[in-house]
Amino acid sequence: MNDKKTILIVDDTPANVSLLNNILKDRYKTKIATNGEKALKLALSNPAPDLILLDVMMPEMDGYEVCECLKSDVITQDIPVVFLTAKVAVEDEAKGLSLGAVDYITKPISAPIVLERVKNHLALKEARDLLQEQNRLLEEKVNERTRQLDELHDVAMEAMGALAESRDPETGNHIKRTQLYVKLLAEALSSHPRFSHFLTPEIITQLYKAAPLHDIGKVGVPDAILLKPGKLTEEEFEVMKLHTVYGRDALLAAEKKLSEPSDFLLFAKEIAYSHQEKWDGSGYPEGLAGEAIPISARIMAIADVYDALISRRVYKPPFSHEKAMTIMIEGRGSHFDPDMLDAFVEISEQCRSVAQKYADSEQDIQSHLGKLQI
């Protein structure tokens, strides 16, 4: 295998070309160009030159112009350029170096100097290429590790949400459906004047990831209340309402272990604590009203209620999409932020599709309901 490096010699004087070729040909492959246009073509040929020896003073396109073209092309910008010139003024050297050349060799040409300079710059390029490749591989590994950690994070959050939901015998695919409703609604609202400043793609992703934790506080509700196959008493409902507090407090405790704030945990706390609030202030746990309810919680409330309406519960059969939408619209301005509800109406067919795709099977429903008999 011939692993000789390739040197492109660019000079319009035949004697200079012959001299340089004789100096280099035993150690390197050589390509020759007698003008700037041909030099640029050869620089793009295969194999590409590993180094270019470039005469400054040439007709039509001088060495400076050729160098500028080489450095402006992503394919040739990393090829080292060494100028060959009889010009020795400081400003001439400064001009060439500012254009991206790595060195100057002054004429008349000295064979030992040419060989040593070429060898040194090829070694520097090889080291630079090796470092770039190592950095590329390292970046790939970092990106892959980050992807794995993000995936692990998402799975862990969904598992935590599923653990809470598993204590509720009625939920089935509730987590997946509501998570997708949240994403669809947030995307629909991202162009609305009231919400566009907040609902960036990054925030929407965080809301999507935080949504599965909306009912994580259910782990703190006693089984006698959470699993009761019938209407709760007023006292029992007061205990049930505490799931919002339990969820908020659990996430707050996790947040305190972090060295810096996390948008994900902030939204998860807002959703867990405030998704039962209502636009008119009649919700819980604080009776917040209007804009005082976090945007994340207002979005979650719509997703949660819609899914509850279309799902079977121990106290009711599943409502049709049409009936559920009628009830949702009746809650515009009382239960729900009116602008958000309007946006939800616009995407309701997409939500219907999500509901159908992730509908609970009859086997799942019977399994969930069977827990009530245990």
Image (cartoon, rainbow, N blue to C red):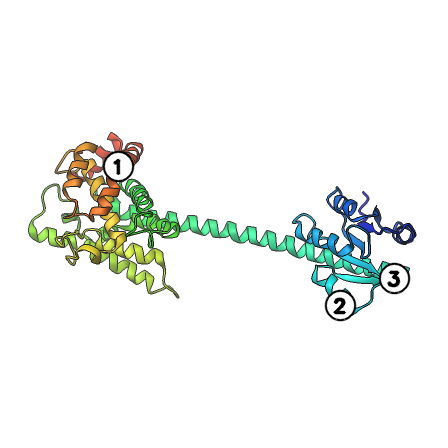
Q: Quadrant of residue 63?
A: bottom right
Q: Is residue 185 left or right of residue 59?
A: left
Q: Horizontal and vertical percent for residue 50? A: 76, 51
Eye-nearest disc, 2 or 1: 2
311 and 338: which is toward the camera = 338
Circle 1 — which element?
helix
Residue positioned 23% across, 52% down in the render? 219
Q: Which mark, residue 348?
A: 1
Q: Amino acid at mark 3?
A: Lys
Circle 2 — which element?
helix
374 and 274: which is toward the camera = 274
Residue positioned 75% across, 47% down in the render? 40
Q: Is residue 335 left or right of residue 353?
A: left
Q: How many marks?
A: 3
Eye-nearest disc, 2 or 3: 2
> Few, some or many C-alpha atoms within 10 Å of disc 2 (few <14, some 14-19, many ≥20)?
few
Vertical placement of 359 versus 157: above or below? above
Mark 1 and mark 3: Cα distance apart in space: 78 Å
Q: Quarter of the image containing the N terminus?
A: top right
Q: Is residue 40 left or right of residue 352?
A: right
Residue at numbered disc 2 = 91
| Comes first in the chain, label 1 or label 3 | 3
| Comes first in the chain, label 2 or label 3 | 2
Mark 2 and mark 1: Cα distance apart in space: 70 Å
Residue positioned 30% across, 48% down in the render? 192
Circle 3 — which element?
loop
Residue at numbered disc 3 = 107
Q: Is residue 370 visible?
A: no
Q: Horizontal and vertical percent for residue 168? A: 21, 44
